[in-house]
Amino acid sequence: MAAPSLLDQLIEALRCLPGVGPRSAQRMALHLLERDRPGGERLSRVVHEAMARIGHCSVCRTLTEHETCAVCSDTARRRDLVCVVEAPADVLAVEQATGFRGQYHVLLGHLSPLDGIGPEELGLDRLEARLDGGEIREVILATGTTAEGEVTAHYISEMARSRGIRSTRIAHGVPLGGELEYVDRGTLSHAFEGRREY
Amino acid sequence: MAAPSLLDQLIEALRCLPGVGPRSAQRMALHLLERDRPGGERLSRVVHEAMARIGHCSVCRTLTEHETCAVCSDTARRRDLVCVVEAPADVLAVEQATGFRGQYHVLLGHLSPLDGIGPEELGLDRLEARLDGGEIREVILATGTTAEGEVTAHYISEMARSRGIRSTRIAHGVPLGGELEYVDRGTLSHAFEGRREY
């Protein structure tokens, strides 16, 4: 065979998307070509612009095409609460699911000395500066429940404590609608340890 | 809220892809931004080029960026067999699954008078010209098993018959590995009628 056809290149390029295997990539390519060329043109344009212009917020490090993100520049939000998360996806999840109206700090990872990820890589110097600013009164730790996430939460809680700032950890336990028999052991054991007065 | 952020625009643009809902679009957008910007750049470039340059083969009407597609311009393929299918996806399916080494004619639809889709819209004038060319000795009818697909197959078989060209219909029946109890009635009844000497 000669050079791959443009259709084959399109199918291959679509496979960079997560969860897209050869068959769905083919279906997507044919759909764009046969039924939605304007959608394809728009996709191409927006992806290009997003890759070129979206960077990280200079305050909280989430993804934004501006110097500071919409949350950080929203003057109507509380400035005394900061929620620490590992990834921009976590910001979206908290925004979509909760009524949280405070600030964020996005670590873009978690402490992992073996991989060379220390406090600086997580922007903790910037978080320290924010804590030193005097406005923040509570740090909500919403890092993952992995060992690294826990270590990171502990490290940040110490940073807060040394400044006399309260830190809280979001609750972990049996998910709503979750049936006990299907919940993994770690979660169930955690839910027992974290039980509260009824 | 002001104008949607570039991230929101990216999520929205990804939803033009079939099978991509709000949550997978978000996952795809964050994946591209956080883990695969080169892949995103390439996707944008290839989608743009594909939308702009891919048209239909002047001979068989499948998708191609050239005047004639790779199959039609492959001189090593048999010129006495033409397989009639409804869509470019069907060409890919036949190429990937079978050893078929003949030509194609892609209808880009099926006869549907109520929708204003007649022989001309399906390029049947072009297929007639090919049949008149004298090289083709068998027309393989691989249109769908819908009523419209059957009517289209019948129409084309008449076109072939009037020229003394043989036409065949691909076999329909119980799929390989299919269990009788799970096969739909139409298929099973078809499989009985189409039974062959053992």
Image: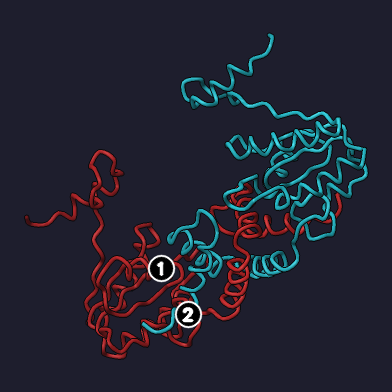
Chain colours: A cyan, B red
- Percent across and percent down for residue B150 are 34, 62
Q: Residues within 10 Å of mark 1 (few under 14, many from 20)?
A: many
- Percent across and percent down for residue B53 are 57, 81
Q: Secondary structure at mark 2?
A: strand
Q: Is residue B168 above or below residue A160?
A: below
Q: Residue furthest top?
A: A198
Q: Return the chain for callout 2.
A: B
Q: Residues within 10 Å of mark 2 (few under 14, many from 20)?
A: many
Q: Is residue A97 above or below residue B167?
A: above
Identified at 29% across, 65% down, the residue is B97
First-in-chain label (2 vs 1): 2
Q: Which mark is residue B86?
A: 1
User: In the figure, residue B18 lies in which quadrant?
Assistant: bottom right
Q: Which residue is mark 2?
A: B64
Q: Are marks 2 and 1 on the same chain?
A: yes
Q: Amino acid at mark 1?
A: Glu
Q: Nearer the viewer, residue B80 or B121?
A: B80
Q: Secondary structure at mark 1?
A: loop
The CA span between labels 2 and 1 is 16 Å
Q: Return the chain for callout 1.
A: B
Identified at 52% across, 79% down, the residue is B55
- Percent across and percent down for residue B64 are 47, 80
Q: Nearer the viewer, mark 2 or mark 1?
A: 2
Q: Nearer the viewer, residue B140 or B17?
A: B17
Q: Is residue A39 left or right of residue B70?
A: right
Q: Amino acid at mark 2?
A: Thr
- Percent across and percent down for residue B165 are 23, 80
Q: Is residue B137 left or right of residue B113?
A: left
Q: Is residue A51 above or below residue B7?
A: below
